Image: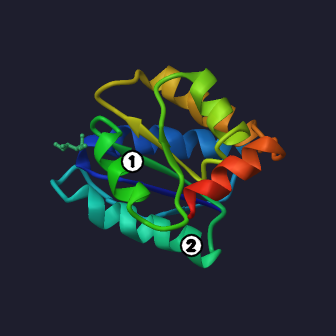
Amino acid sequence: MIAIGCDHGGFNLKCAIMKKLDEMGENYKDFGTYSADSCDYPDIAKKACAAIISGECEKGILICGTGIGMSMAANKIHGIRAAHVTDTFSARVTKEHNDANVICLGERITGVEVALECVEAYLKAEFLGGRHKIRIDKLED
Ligand code: RB5
C-alpha cells in the first residue's frame, strides 16, 4: 500500500499520480488534501508518514508546490527517509541506495510527465542492501 498526500500546491499533480497508480494496478491510500483549497503541508505529511511508520503503508508519495516543504516535514519523523526528487535517476537510486520510503515531488517545479516517470522509476526500483544498509542504519543512530 502506498500512502499519497499533497497540499493545495500539489493537488493537481497528486490527481495525475493517482491516475497513473490506477493504471499500474498499485494500491494506495489518499491522505488528502482533497481540494485545491489552502492547507498546511506538515499536517498531510504527518498523517501519511504515520501510516508508513505503523506499517499500514510501505512507502509514500508526497507532493507540494516545490516538494521541499513535504520533504522537510517527512524527514522530521523518525524512521522516514524522504527524498525530494526532480529526475528519474534520483528517483530510482534513492530507493536502491537510500531505501527511501517516501519521495517528494513539486508540482510547480517538475512537469507532469517527468513526475510520473519519477514515480514509476521509484516504484520499480529495489533496495540494494549491503554497504547501503550499513549507511542507512547510521541515519537512525
Ligand atoms: C504552498 O504555497 C507552498 O508553500 C507549498 O506547497 C510548498 O511548496 C512548500 O514547500
Q: Which residue is mark 2?
A: 53
Q: Can residue 25 be seen in the rendering of this structure?
A: no
- Amino acid under disc 1: Ser
The answer to which of 15 and 2 lies nearer the viewer is: 2
Residue type at mark 2 is: Ile
Quadrant for the N terminus in the image: bottom right
Q: How much space separates mark 2 and mark 1, taking CA atoms?
A: 16 Å
- Residue 86: percent from the left, percent from the top? 46, 26
Residue at the extreme bottom? 54
Q: Quadrant of the C terminus?
A: bottom right
Is residue 100 something that shows in the picture?
yes
Image quarter where ligand 1 lies: top left
Q: Does 97 sit left or right of 74 as displayed?
A: right
Q: Residues within 10 Å of mark 1 (few under 14, many from 20)?
A: many
Residue at x 41%, y 70% (from the top left corner):
47
Q: Which residue is mark 1?
A: 71
Residue 94 percent location from the top left of the image = 62, 37
Vertically, is 87 above or below 97?
Answer: above
Determine the residue positioned at 32% across, 40% down.
68
Q: Residue at x 41, y 57 (%)?
A: 74
Q: Secondary structure at mark 2?
A: helix
Q: Position of residue 24 (x, y in %)?
A: 71, 42
**Label 2 neighbourhood size at 10 Å, few (<14), some (14-19), many (20+)?**
some
Residue 19, image x and y in percent?
A: 55, 42
Q: Residue furthest left?
A: 38
Nearer-the-camera pick, 38 or 55: 55
Of mark 2 and mark 1, the one earlier in the sequence is 2
